[in-house]
Image: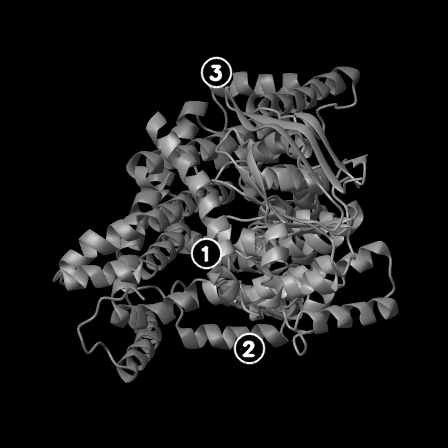
Amino acid sequence: MAQVSVHTGPGRKELLFLSCAGVVGFFAGWHLLSVSGWFPKQFLPGPVAVLETIVQLSREKYSGDTLWGHLAASLGRFGVGFLLAAAIGIPLGLLMGWFRWLDDIVSPFFEALRFVAPIAWVPFAGLWFGTGIGGPTLIIFSGAFPPCLINAYRGAKYVDRRLVEAAQTLGAGGIRITAEVLLPASLPSILAGLRVSAGIGWQSLVGAELIVVASGVGYMMVQGQLNVATTIVMAGMIAIGLVGVVIDFALRWFEIRIKQSWGR
Amino acid sequence: MSKIAFERVSRSFVRGKESFEALVDISLEVQEREFVAIVGPSGCGKTTLLRMVAGLEFPSSGSVRVANVEVAGPGPDRAVVFQAFALFPWKSVEENIGFGLKCRGVSEADRRPVVAQFVELMGLIGYENAYPHQLSGGMQQRVAIARSYALDPGVLLMDEPFGALDAQTRVVMQEELIRLSRLKPRTVLFITHSVEEAVYLADRVVVMTRRPGRIKEILDVGSVRRSEGWGRLEHVEEVMDTESFVHLRTRIWRMLREQQEAAAARH
Amino acid sequence: MSDAAALPPRHESIGSGHRIAIGMAALGVAIAAWFVCSAAGVITGGRFPTPSDVYRAALQITGANGYAGGSLLQHVWQSCRLVLLGFAVAVSTGVPVGLTMGASRRADALIGPVFSLLRPIPPLAWIPLAILWLGLGDTAKIFLIWVAAFAPALINTYVGVRNVDPTLIEAARVHGARSRRMLFDVLVPGSLPMIFTGLRLSLQASWTTLVAAELLGAFTGLGKVLSVAALDIYPGMILFAMLWVGLLGALMTRSLEWLEVKLLPWLK
């Protein structure tokens, strides 16, 4: 580890203390700022107020639904876009990695679209899909698609050629090679891509919901902003952050389970 | 009829704007159940020769025939043991060994006894469910050899199979291979950098020149082995201690050294 | 399915020039199809613009009156200006903090947990808050860009420092290097590749966030053009603006990569 420390170095107790101090300091500072009177109350509510709001939102409806209801709507949209991105991106990426001609044909389109930020699709999303689910799906898809494709592509392209040759010399035909060699060999890369894809997809969803929908956490936050209900906005931010962490952890767990059962 | 026949095989390839000749006019016949080793300096094309028999590469001119049929592609009749083992990391030892049989359509029930036989033969008992990354280099190569043998191939192609192992393991594996060859003899084409290994294992040793690779000389080691009785000696080091062995080995070394000096002189 | 790609081809593999030609041809076919469909009436400009729609939009925005409050040049300049400003602020804060946290276990312990708490909140989720606090002007945009671009710069710098080959550090220690020298002569150069990766990610994040922020509320900028075009139901302008967003994003990324190659020749 590249840490430059004095010979004795900080002990574990000291580090633990510093970590706690940091977190406590952050919340304390926040609280103090909110009651200091330097900022109008509506603009910087304290941590306690935000917590209360979260609890309140769990029971009462705001802008059409409780916090959980909004979250469910958001997750639903995210799920559709993410699964679509994976269902198209992974097979396409694998095929592009195996068949150079496909790579040559598809790459230019991919490269051209890749640099368009997902959010830039919002106008067309609204135009083509109105407030239906197609709109957010398109935006999430445009964010979640590249990592799925690229990682599947890399996984397929950089498969150890020796393994393929070994399978050939053992008599394996095309289908068997695909299923029993190429796919497992690409799996680690695919899984890594899924995690990145989910992260970007969830973030893009927020962007999508800030504009084209009538439910979901993003929508809730916009309503909160319009009503200058900062606690609502902050509650939304925290909810989104937490769900993002949960999704990431779930995928990590899934990745580890697969790795174990495949014997790596 | 020979098992493997190289007839005026040449191989050249293009890199950028230049063309390189890797092999020139190679003609060689390997008989049924013969163990032929090929030695030569790096880049002399010996691996390419092996890959041509395997059907992983093709000659620019000339033909490569196995059992009088021109080689068209890879197949289980010509099993390959790679230097880097090439075991499937996500399959267990058993699954790796049984892979060729699985490709052939042999049912699980019929595979099991064959796999078990080779597990025992290669000293892998207890490791059937282990995964390659859990095994040492020597063990992994045993699995690779078992995997190839399980197919009961007509030809066994070994590309510096012990090159990635440490010196002691290498010696053990050489003895193993001799033992295996006695139990289940078949036609073997063996590539190696080690002259000692070649002389110890082979019936005939083919010495190649630097690129462009030609055959410099073919030595009949088998007759020396029989007349000197190496087979009666138990250990590798005993064989390598005999005068006849040293004589052969030195002869080949000299040939290779001449090559090196000639090449150095050219620069 | 053939295993054509797995078997080495008998013929020599086609040169890269050939492959680029295939790609260009594919694109060409698509563009040609666009023209043909427009002429045939399959594409009517209601949902997807025809080439002439886009051309009209281009003329309008580069013309005397511009569109959405400015000419193309003004919008592009506004967006790029803000991105570069925000990027600069994010990098000049993120990299030093990353270096500090990477080099000092104490700093890591102090700052790390708080950072981990705030990081999961997507940058776009800060937009409503930013609007509440700072309005719709430049400051709000730069704040948002900072929020988005700070994290990749910090994290990649941190990882870069942590991953410096320990053997190099030991060698430096043996030669008597103390903290300051260690930092500048060993840690920074050693982590430069990862720092550059962080810069690239930061720049991309900056650009994405800015467009989003402008879409939601701005006075000028490409994002503003997009949102006005959306409200006007002007597909030609939408596509034209999207093209510029993509183009500028690609340009910035490639420039940074070019810079990386120039500054770090020993990597390639």
At numbered mark 2, what does the secondary structure look like: helix, strand or loop? helix
CA distance for labels 1 and 3: 35 Å
- Circle 3 is placed at which residue position? C63
- Circle 2 is placed at which residue position? A55
Q: Which mark is residue C126?
A: 1
Q: Work out whether residue A174 or residue A32 is closer to the camera in this orientation and state it.
A: A174
Q: Amino acid at mark 3?
A: Gly
- Classify A240 as above or below B244: below
Dot 3 surroundings within 10 Å: few (below 14), some, or many (20 or more)? few
Q: Quarter-wise, where is residue C14 in the image? A: top right
State which chain disc 3 sits on: C
Which percent across, then down, holds residue C16? 56, 25
CA distance for labels 2 and 3: 54 Å
Q: Work out whether residue C165 or residue A258 is closer to the camera in this orientation and state it.
A: C165
Q: Amino acid at mark 1?
A: Trp
Which percent across, then down, holds residue A13? 29, 84
At numbered mark 1, what does the secondary structure look like: helix, strand or loop? helix
Which residue is painted at 38% across and 30% down in the image? B262
Quarter holding the N terminus of chain C is top right
Instruction: Give whichever of discs 1 and 3 has the lower sequence position.
Output: 3
Q: Work out whether residue C175 or residue B39 is closer to the camera in this orientation and state it.
A: B39
Is residue A10 visible in the rendered image? The answer is: yes
Which residue is painted at 76% across and 59% down in the image? B99
State which chain disc 2 sits on: A
